Image (cartoon, helix red, strand yellow):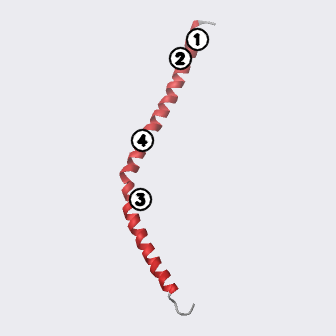
Amino acid sequence: MDQTFINWVIAGAGATLGWIMRIIWTEIKLVQKNQREIESNISDNYVRKDDYRVDIAEIKGMLGRIFDRLENKADK
């Protein structure tokens, strides 16, 4: 084989690998940007744990009162 041909093959493989790595790098940067946006907006989209616990406790209290009324009904 001619040395020039081997050099062209290696250069082509290097260029292809570089192109693939550039695509992967841009996708990683895009994912990191999206992750930062999600992290900054997470408090707007999701309920915090302590708020959730307060709401669930309120619902459980209401259900307890409903069940107590049902248990105390005279026409059982």
Q: Is residue 4 left or right of residue 55?
A: right
Give the CA distance from mark 3 to mark 2: 50 Å
Residue 6: mark:
1
Q: Earlier in the sequence, mark 3 or mark 2?
A: 2
Q: Is residue 2 left or right of residue 35?
A: right
Q: Give the secondary structure at mark 4.
A: helix
**Residue 59: quadrant of the picture:** bottom left
Where does label 4 land, which residue? 32
Residue 46: mark:
3
Where does label 2 land, which residue? 11
User: Which residue is depicted at the point 45% across and 37% down?
Assistant: 28
Residue type (three-letter) at the residue carrying disc 2: Ala
Residue type (three-letter) at the residue carrying disc 3: Tyr
Residue type (three-letter) at the residue carrying disc 4: Gln
Q: Is residue 38 left or right of residue 19?
A: left
Query: Can you name the residue that lies furthest to the bottom here?
Result: 75
